[in-house]
Image (cartoon, rainbow, N blue to C red):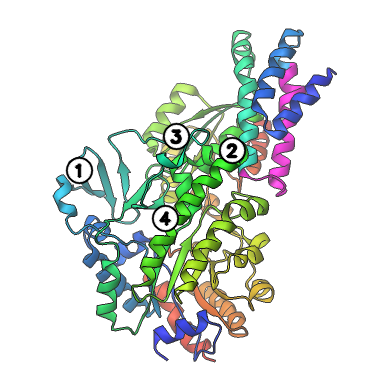
Amino acid sequence: MTPRERILAAMRLQPVDKIPLMCQMSIGHMLQQFQCSPAEFWHDARCFAEGLLSLRELYQFDGILVSLHGHDPEWKNNIASRRMTGEYEEILWKNGDTTHFLFDDLPEHISAAPKNLLDIFSVTKNDLPQHVNFIPVSQGLNFFIHPEHRFDIFRILREKTGGEISIHGEITSPLDYYLECTGYQEGLMGMIDAPGQVKMVMQHFTEQLQELAAAMCGEDIDAIKISSPYAGAGFISPEFYSEFVLPYERELARTVRGADVEIYTHTCGAVNDRLEMMFDAGVSGIECLDPVPLGDVELEDAFTRIGSRGFIKGNIDSVSVLLQGTKEEIISDVRRRIEIGKQFPGFILSTACSIAPRAPKEHIQLLRTLIDEYGRK
Amino acid sequence: MNPLLQTLAETIIDGKHLDADRITMQLLEEGLTPMTILDEGLLPGMGVVGRRFRDGEMFLPQVLVSARAMKSAMKHLDPILAASNAEPKGTILIGTVRGDVHDIGKNLVSVMLQGNGYKVIDMGIQNPAEKFLAMYEEHQPDIIGLSALLTTTMMYMKTIIELFKEKNIPVPIIIGGAPVTQKFADEIGANGYARNAVDAVDLVHAIMKR
């Protein structure tokens, strides 16, 4: 099987020759390994694509997750000044903003103007963006999507990989867009204070994201990951999950699967109490399933409960095991997950959350060795 | 006991900030002391919130509205308590470390500590070691709390702890954040680790009793 065929088969619960391997990588980890200008890596589609390809090659992953898309090819025209310090690459933008591009983590963006947050009590549809033109990457950090270059990155990658590697896009959950626009604490309280308003905002973003996802599906990708980090038990109850997450992710799933593309949800932390509900969105699979201590999912139990409903992509602890563990601890932990995953269809071996920035490359390379030794079917 | 104190506790648990505001004013008008309102109404209410959060019966939105209700009540009590020189249970300096902009967990710890009678000086995000030192010297807190969400920034906690050790300042420094563990806390010489906001309050209680 080619890597792409292997991933596709696993996502469709079909037989595979060996367990597929595909981890999502943090920007910091890619920068540590790829060694380039962090600003170029963040803003330049070709540089980002080269990094993704280089790391896939290094780790022999079967697929590539494209976490950023919509790079502006003219981004350098917005630069007022640029300098390198010992700690970061700094860009002062013509609009007065500053960005510090770290060498081992996400950029830090400092806006010149204070951010206008939405007031959930008074917001109307007219106050909301009419097009989704950004990706809420992390708290306070957005990546702007150029409307005419939304999917250049996928074309570059497809051209370079010749269709042999599984390529996945990423869409951020409507819940993240909502929280980014209201502020996280106000947004969470809004679910109690003004649930009808919250749903109006969520529905609005969902419609925008459906359009984005549908267009992304036309780029010869195999799957879209919904990044939904705030939907776990560390934040909201199962009841709120059902009320404020499920209906909207269900709409996204319907759009993507209607285009014959797979879709899976990534929610970090504790999700053991809602594994079944996550599948109620109609997704093809779920990703992450953090084990203790970051989360609370036991892989074998998860397969028993939901393994027949779709694929599972996870669940190696990227911090305690791959970042901090010894070689022996990694082998023992990963081998156990391979042995469990081998018993069920639809397993993709992956880190739960992204590979941590400073995880040694030798630790990640062990994954391929272990799959080849123990993961054949 | 004035039955309104029980009602006040319930408004905290239910997160009804307007009711908490109104009932607190009413209790003050009836002649209850701020300490009585705090000890017999607000703190028992926040105690229930903490227990339910720890046991998975309450989640972040509910805790945040409870904290907001607590704040609504405290805005009436704080000026009187300050004027009477009433001592808080302790003073905690808390902040997210340099390089890290994440503050949801830190804010939650902050409100839970305030809700349990501590004075909290919240330094916000992106704090270098020197700022922790300067704030320590200015406020003389009983405990310092460090927060980090990232595996890259959690390493900076060690820098802060080492700075305080270099200066021979014996203030207890406790840490928390998603990637942080007890093992990591031991490795970097922290005086304590809390897995979540409720554990952080218990940890602070325990350290203050020493």
Residue A132 forms part of the magenta stretch: no
User: Which residue type does callout 3 highlight?
Assistant: Gly
Separation of residues labelled 3 and 2 (CA atoms): 27 Å
Tag 2–tag 4 contact (CB < 8 Å): no
Left or right: where A55 falls relative to A274: left
Q: CA distance from mark 2 to mark 4?
A: 22 Å
Give the prevailing secondary structure in the magenta stretch: helix
- Residue at the spot x=52%, y=62% of the render? A251
Asked where in the image residue A51 lies, by quadrant, the reply is: bottom left
Instruction: Name the residue at 17% across, 47% down.
Output: A78
B112 sits left or right of B131 in the view? right
Q: Are marks 3 and 4 on the same chain?
A: no
Magenta stretch, residue numbers: B36-60
Q: Residue A208, labelled with which disc? A: 4
* Amino acid tagged 2: Ala
Q: Chain of mark 1?
A: A
Give the mark nearer the N terminus: 2 vs 4.
2
Q: Residue at x 46, y 66 (%)?
A: A225
Is B12 placed above or below A278 here?
A: above
Q: CA distance from mark 1 to mark 2?
A: 37 Å
Same chain for mark 3 and mark 2? The answer is: no
| Cα gap from disc 3 to disc 4, whole angstroms | 33 Å
Q: Which mark is residue B124?
A: 3
Front position among marks 3 and 4: 4
- At label 4, counting other C-alpha atoms closer than 10 Å, the crowd grade (few under 14, some 14-19, many 20 or more) is some
Q: Which residue is mark 1?
A: A93
Q: Circle 4 marks a residue in which chain? A: A
Question: Where's residue A250, x and y in %?
Answer: 55, 63
Gap in angstroms between the C-alphas marked 1 and 3 = 25 Å
Compared across the picture, whether A171 is left or right of B120 comes to left
Say whether residue B50 is magenta: yes
